[in-house]
Amino acid sequence: MRLWLAAPDPDWRVAVGESIAVSGACLSVVGSADPRTGELVRPGSAGADIVFDLSAETLLRTWFRSSATGSLVNVERPLELGDRLDGHMVSGHVDGLGRILSIEDSRDGGRVMAIGAGPGLERYLIDKGSITVDGVSLTVVVPRAERFDVALIPITLEKTSLGRAAVGQSVNLEADLVGKWIERLVPAARLRS
């Protein structure tokens, strides 16, 4: 499957092979396209659409397989070594899908969103732990088995696709990178003891 993404800003330039996080999934740029005609243009052209090829694994683990023209996505360039780290460490390797179960307004102008996590992801849901929802770094609140809440502040609602999210919508989930490494390494260390 091929994905065309409108440049988030007229000055955006990308190179073939560059990694871009699209709603939390790390995708590699395969080209640039003229936004009016869809024809491929010289990579790095300012304001050109960004073109990605989506693998079977990406389609299996994300909601992109059911996306439609005009779908709203979050876009983020990768961290450069030496940059300040905001949020938590994520790789853009989506662990699975979740589904928005409910959305409630809060008194502070934000919202509380309840999300059902896919099977196997519940082990990463730790109260005040980190989770990425469609590429947005958030804090888990009150995990209950395969369900958890996240609190969304007004700026998150304004600047990300989560502000327009709807109940029943699928979302890409990535668990905390450090937690996944600890889970992988601790049992191996115990076997050597």
Image (cartoon, grey):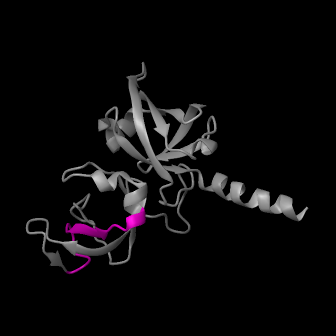
Q: Position of residue 179 (x, y in %)?
A: 66, 52
Residue 124 appears in the figure: yes
**Position of residue 119 in the picture relative to residue 106 (left or right):** right
Quadrant of res 113: top left
Based on the displayed image, in which of its 4 quarters is residue 165 positioned? top left
25 vs 174, left or right, is left
Residue plotted at (35% across, 51% down)? 63
Identify the residue shown where x is 60% and y is 40%: 125
Q: Looking at the image, can residue 21 be seen?
A: no
Which residue lies at the image location 38% right of the left edge and 27% below the top edge?
103
Quick one: 100 or 120, which is closer to the camera? Answer: 120
Q: Is residue 45 magenta?
A: yes
| View extreme (top): residue | 107
Quarter holding the C terminus is bottom right
Q: Is residue 71 above or below residue 60?
A: above
User: Please, is residue 36 above or below residue 171 in the view?
Assistant: below
- Percent across and percent down for residue 93 are 49, 60
* Residue lying at the far left of the rendered structure: 37
Work out which residue is located at the far bottom of the displayed protein and give it.
Answer: 42
Relative placement, left or right, of 39 versus 106 is left
Residue at figure coordinates x 53%, y 63% from the top left: 83
Picture coordinates of residue 111, whole percent (x, y): 41, 28
In the rendered view of the protein, which quadrant contains the N terminus? bottom left
Vertically, is 95 above or below 50? Answer: above
Front residue of 8/27: it is 27
Q: Is residue 22 magenta?
A: no
**Residue 123 figure quarter:** top right
Q: Which residues are magenta?
A: 42-57
Q: As displayed, is residue 140 above or below residue 95?
A: above
